[in-house]
Image: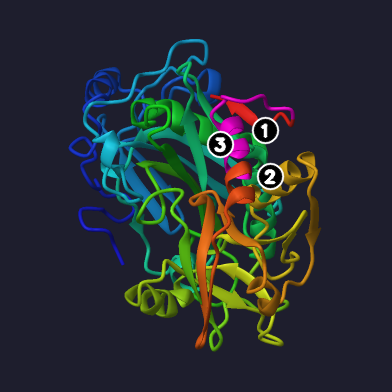
Amino acid sequence: MRARGAAPVGGRGVDLMARASPLARPAVATRRAARVAVGAGGGGGGDRLGLEPPACGAREYCVGYGAMARSRRVVPRALDSSSMHAPPTDDVDWDNLGFSCEHVSKTMMFVATATLGADGQTWEWKEEGVGPYGALAMDPSAQCLNYGQSIFEGMKAQRTMEGNLVLFRPSENAKRMRDGAARMSMAPPPEDLFLRGVKATVAANAAFVPPNGKGALYCRPLLLGSGPILGLGPAPSYTFLVYCSPVGSYFKGGQLDPIRLKVEEVEHRAAPGGTGNTKCAGNYSPVLNVQLEAKQRGFNDVLYLDAVSNTYVEEVSSCNIFAVFGNKIVTPSLGTILPGVTRKSIMDLARSKGFEVEEAPLAIDDVLRADEVFTTGTAVVLSPVGYIERGEEGREYQNTEVAMSLYEALTGIQQQTMDDPFGWVVTV
């Protein structure tokens, strides 16, 4: 499988100049003239060496790494964290921003690759740096295409009222990717590389971070087993990249509109001993059939039950779930569910507000009797639940007081409108 316009190893590849942001094109031209492949980094952009482009051409930076190769012009961006970031661009309608890839082709992305060192044991990472978003040339025998070595993260960058660009607990995402890589037998990106890549991507796309209160820049770190392999086994090389897109509310109807969930009693998202607690790509497409059916019936998403007894809730397709019983908040135990960063943060915030928080098996019968229910996740942030249906039985929830209190506390910290006693926010 090859992306349209991309080339195999050694080819010229897709012309990313045409895809680059208008802000990036002058820099690309400068890079061509200088014949330098990767610009010097600084601040949040990481340290990158200036490299003379190889024989494939002065205007392109060609990198072959096993199953994946790219031929791309890398834009020089000296990122200085002490300088003011670019204001929001006028090319986006910030008042009508959805959750989609509508603007992703205008952005920049970060790329690094890993190959085994001479000792055959140590992974050596090479940073290609930040360049225009564009297609990848993929070898048909790439491990990720045949055996599924692919994991990702979801993060958001916010613009504060003071104009700062901030991230929320990025080290937690770095840790979760490392844990997922271990489970999937992949080369884990070192934390400093992960953070450098995310910060460089945010800084290079400062113009696409929405105005304060209008949304966020959603960042997608992605780790791929890009090296070729025929028999079942780990990839011989890996690609780590970070791309992004400005986004608004995840669910249609608005961020704080209570959502409607359908309980799925036949199919299951994960099973004990499986990969339900990793953010691997294969966990998500199997839920699409029941999710699409639920959406056609007017639901926002699906609530899954455990695969053993079919009586305990696990999580929604894209987020964790909480139930409130008076002063007690319960969320399902970890094991087969994703250890959400927002989930973990809400638990800490709730405890700081005096709630008793418990991680325990949570029966669907108890959820249907709860005072209120809400979901959490990077994409959804925190969404109150207004209705849950199981079979012929349905329950409406009128109370959202606890959910709204925690939402305001969480977003206040994320946008620096409230104190951050936990030290969660990181400035780009």
Q: In the visual, does 327 lie left or right of 50?
A: right
Q: Position of residue 176 (x, y in %)?
A: 66, 51
What is the quadrant of residue 320 in the picture?
Answer: bottom right
Q: Which residue is depicted at the point 61% across and 61% down?
A: 373
Q: Answer few, some or many: residues within 10 Å of disc 3's Cα (few below 14, many 20 plus, some between 14 and 19).
A: some
Disc 3 residue type (three-letter) = Thr
Q: Position of residue 228 (x, y in %)?
A: 47, 65
Q: Nearer the viewer, mark 3 or mark 2?
A: 3
Q: Earlier in the sequence, mark 1 or mark 2?
A: 2
Mark 1 to mark 3 CA distance (whole Å): 12 Å
Answer yes or no: is residue 63 visible.
yes
Q: In the visual, does 292 lie left or right of 60?
A: right
Q: Looking at the picture, tell me which residue is in the foreground, 20 or 344.
A: 344
Are dots 3 and 2 in contact, CB under 8 Å?
Answer: no
Q: Nearer the viewer, mark 1 or mark 3?
A: 3
Q: Looking at the picture, tell me which residue is in the foreground, 356 or 415.
A: 356
In the displayed image of the protein, which residue is found farthest to the front?
398
What is the quadrant of residue 351 in the picture?
Answer: top right
Q: Position of residue 72 (x, y in %)?
A: 31, 39
- The residue under label 3 is 411
| Residue extent of the magenta highlight | 406-421
- The residue under label 2 is 345
Disc 1 residue type (three-letter) = Trp
Q: Which residue is depicted at the point 24% across and 34% down?
A: 92
Are dots 1 and 2 in contact, CB under 8 Å?
Answer: yes
Disc 2 residue type (three-letter) = Ser
Answer yes or no: is residue 151 visible.
no
Q: Is residue 403 magenta?
A: no
Mark 1 to mark 2 CA distance (whole Å): 9 Å
Q: Which residue is depicted at the point 71% across and 29% down?
A: 423
- The residue under label 1 is 424
What is the quadrant of residue 411 in the picture?
Answer: top right
